[in-house]
Amino acid sequence: MHVIRCSASVLAALSAVLCAAPGALGEPQHDKPEPRRYEAYCRTVVDGSSATAHCNNPYPGSDRVRLHIECERWWDLDVDSAPVLVEPAGYVELTGRCWKEIGAVWISHQPLAYP
């Protein structure tokens, strides 16, 4: 059996650490919760060299959406649409195209905080 002996100074230092300010040891802080972020539902449709995004926002917060199209051919310019605001209960369509084949299509979101 092993006995561990601690001096008074070690015990004092240990108690100072254990009795530190709240949150110092990873305790949860009771700050104001982060506002919710709502993202619109979007689906994309590719038809040949054209792409369309259909975005619907069923939430009470607004969302800025952008359509991004990566063209398959190296010489074909990729497409990044301007941001479009989708208001609560709103609907938008975004379209873009490549000269030839489409390699990838995606939507980026920038939801506005809603309390």
Image (cartoon, rainbow, N blue to C red):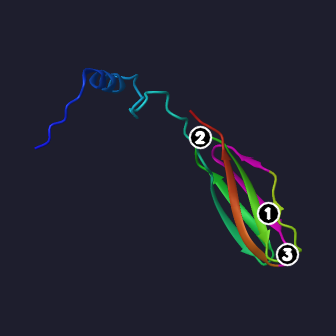
Secondary structure of the residue carrying tag 2 is: loop
Q: Are marks 1 and 2 in contact (CB under 8 Å)?
A: no
Q: Going 30% across and 21% down the picture, which residue do you hit? A: 9
- Give amino acid for label 3: Trp
- Give amino acid for label 2: Pro
Left or right, 101 with respect to 55, comes to right
The image position of residue 45, as x and y in percent, is 70, 70
Q: Which residues are magenta?
A: 83-100
- Front position in the image: 100 or 6: 6
- How far separated are the C-alphas under marks 3 and 2? 41 Å
Residue topped by disc 3: 74
The image position of residue 83, as x and y in percent, is 78, 49
- How far separated are the C-alphas under marks 1 and 2? 25 Å
Magenta stretch: residue 51 in it? no
Residue topped by disc 1: 95
Q: Earlier in the sequence, mark 3 or mark 2?
A: 2
Q: Residues within 10 Å of mark 3 (few under 14, many from 20)?
A: few
Residue topped by disc 2: 60
Q: Nearer the viewer, mark 3 or mark 2?
A: 3
- Front position in the image: 18 or 89: 18
Q: Quadrant of the N terminus?
A: top left
